Image (tube, coloured by chain):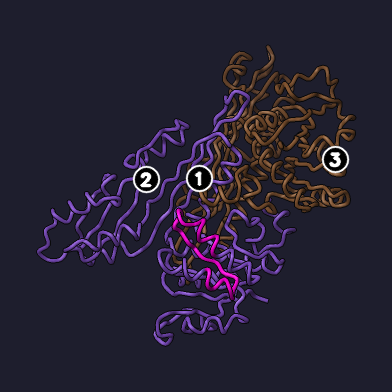
Chain colours: A purple, B brown
Amino acid sequence: MSIRIGILGYGNLGRGVECAIKHNPDLELKAVFTRRDPASVKILTETAKVYHVDEAVKMKEDIDVMILCGGSATDLPVQTPEYAKYFNVVDSFDTHAKIPEHFAAVDKAAKENGKTALISAGWDPGMFSLNRLYANAIMPEGKDYTFWGKGVSQGHSDAVRRIKGVIDARQYTIPVEKALEAVRNGENPELTTREKHTREVFVVAAEGADKAKIENEIKTMPNYFDEYDTTVHFITEEEMKKDHAGLPHGGFVIRTGKTGWNDEHNHVIEYSLKLDSNPEFTSSVIAAYARAVYRLNKEGQTGCKTVFDIAPAYLSAQSPEELRAHML
Amino acid sequence: MSIRIGILGYGNLGRGVECAIKHNPDLELKAVFTRRDPASVKILTETAKVYHVDEAVKMKEDIDVMILCGGSATDLPVQTPEYAKYFNVVDSFDTHAKIPEHFAAVDKAAKENGKTALISAGWDPGMFSLNRLYANAIMPEGKDYTFWGKGVSQGHSDAVRRIKGVIDARQYTIPVEKALEAVRNGENPELTTREKHTREVFVVAAEGADKAKIENEIKTMPNYFDEYDTTVHFITEEEMKKDHAGLPHGGFVIRTGKTGWNDEHNHVIEYSLKLDSNPEFTSSVIAAYARAVYRLNKEGQTGCKTVFDIAPAYLSAQSPEELRAHML
C-alpha cells in the first residue's frame, strides 16, 4: 500500500513535491490544499484532488503525511505546529536562527497528539546540515566552510524588484573560485563576506528610468549587497524570459581537519550540489523524509525530528537487506 | 564519564584509532590487545595498558566499546562475531560482497548477548555508502559513480611486491579527470574500467633484476592491472622512503539525476575526500561510530547495525539542542 501524501500550498515547492511523488512509486499524492479557490488551481496528477485548506482537518484519516509548502517567514511558524495536531508533517523551515523555537512548538503539538513531524528538510538546512554534522563528528578539530551558488537568490531578487524603476530582476550568488581553491588546498583561510561570494544582478528597467541611480541603489543596499562585489546588467524583458527563467542553485560544504598524534595529517571532506531547479531538489529531499516520517510514526516514534535524528535507511524505499547487499 | 575504548590489533588502523581517541575528549583509551608479546608493543597513550589478546574477555567490565582493528580477509569474520558476545564492538569490515553474511553472524552474537555492534565503518564502506544511500533516496532516477584516488592501494602494492626481483612497491590508483568531468557535466557516460582509473606503480628492483620483465608482469597481471592503463617507474630505496612513505587516499561519489514532471531538470550531488592518511581517517570515522554504539547500547538497541541504521546525531559529542542551534 502506498503512503498517502497531502500537499498544503501549491507554489514552486508544492509543484516540486508533486513531481517528486511521481518519481517515488511507494508515495501517492492524495490531495492538494490551497488558500485560493480550489477550482482555480490546476494540478498535474490526475488521480489527486484540490481542496480548500479549510477542508484539510476533515481529511485527517485519508492522509498519512502532510507536506507543508508555505514560507518560513509567516506561514510555517503557524502552520506546522497547527497541522502537527492532526497529521504527520514535513516542512522546509529555513530560518536557521529560529529553528530551536520552531522545533519546540512543533514537538509539543506532535507529541501531545501522537504524530511525527520533521522540520527543516531540504538542502540548507538539510543535506548541507547533515554533511556539516558528519564531517564535524569525524574530525572534531577542523574548520567548516559553506559556499552557495552559482544560483538564484529569491530574497535578493525580490529586494531589487522593490527599487523604483525596476520591472523585473534576477540575482545570482556566485562563490569566489579563488577562495574555494584556498579552502580545498587546506590553507584554512579566514574569509570575509566579500572574499567568499560575488553577486550578479540582471535588471529590466522601466522606460526612461535612471539606470545609474538603480545600479547605485543596488550596490549600496545594506545587508543585501553593500558587503559584496556586485555586477549589474540591464537587459530586456525578452532576455529575462529567455535566459533567466530557471531557478538553479547549489553550493559547497567543506570541512578541513587534522589527524595524527601531532596533527600531522590533513584531510578535506567536500560535499557539493549543482541543481537545475532549487525547488524541485528541495522537494525531492522532502519526499524522502516523508517516507521516513511515515515509518517512524508506525513505530511509535512521535514528536518533532530533524534530519539529524533520522537513520539514513528510513529514507530509502529499499529494504535494509537490499541496502546492505548493494549500497554499503 | 568517558566512554572506555579497547583496541584489538595494533597496526596502522589501531594506531589511527589511538590518535582519533586523543581528538575526542569524551573517549578514553583503556587498553590495547595484541597477539604479539605485549612487552614488545609500545603505544602512545601513557594512561593505557597493553595486554595479550587472551586477556580481553576477562576485561569485559572495563571496556565500553571494543574496536576491532584486524583485517577483513581472515581476522574480522572470526573476531567480530566472537567479541560481540562480550563487548559492544565496531569493525571496518570492507569485503563488500560478504557484508550480508558477516552482518548475520555478528547480529546473532550481539543480540543473544545484549550487545551492540557496528560493522563496516570507514569511508568505503562507510561515508561513501552513506552518500550513495542519501543521493539515491533523494533522486530515485539517476546514475551512481564512484571514483577512488589519487591514493595508495595496499592490495595492489602487495601484489607487485610478490613479483620476483621486486624489493618494494607502491601503487597509486588515479581517477581519470576526463571521466570525472563528463560525469559532473551530467553526460551520464557508460565508463569501462580503463576509462575510470589509471594505475601508477613505483618499484624498487633488486640489483640485476630484469626490469622489462617486471614491468611486463605488472601490466599484464590479471584482475589487478590487465584492465587498466598502468605506468611503471623504477626508483631507488631512498626515493621510496622519501617520496612514498605516506598512505594518502580519497575519491569521489557522484550521483546525477533528474527531477520535474517530464524529467526536465538535471542535478549533480558530489561527495569527495582528499586524505593524507587513509588509516587515520578511517579510524576517525570508527571513533565517531564507537560513541554511537555506546549510546545505542545504553538505550537497549542491541544487535548488529551499519552506518545506514544510525541517526547522525548519535555520532556527535554535542547535544541535540546544540546541534539544532548551531549546525542545522
The chain holding disc 1 is B
Distance from label 3 to label 1 (Cα)?
A: 42 Å
Q: Say which mark, if any, is on residue B180.
A: 1
Q: Which residue is mark 3?
A: B83
- Classify 10 Å Cα crowding around label 3: few (below 14), some (14-19), many (20 and above): many
In the image, residue B233 above or below residue A111: above
Task: Measuring from the top left, give residue B315's x and y in whole percent.
Answer: 64, 45
Residue under the image location 42 percent in, 46 percent down: A147
* Amino acid type of the residue that numbered disc 3 sits on in the rendered structure: Tyr
Q: Nearer the viewer, mark 2 or mark 3?
A: 3
Q: Is residue A203 left or right of residue A22?
A: left
The chain holding disc 3 is B
In the image, residue B153 above or below residue A34: above
Task: Measuring from the top left, give residue A28's x and y in whole percent.
Answer: 59, 76
Task: Measuring from the top left, give residue B180's x and y in whole percent.
Answer: 50, 45
In the image, residue A140 above or below residue B114: above
Labels 3 and 1 touching (C-beta < 8 A)? no
Q: Which residue is mark 2?
A: A175
Q: Quadrant for the N terminus of chain B, please.
A: top right
Q: Nearer the viewer, mark 2 or mark 1?
A: 2
Bounds of the magenta span? Answer: A81-105
State the residue in front, A60 or B307. Answer: A60
For residue A178, say whether it is visible.
yes
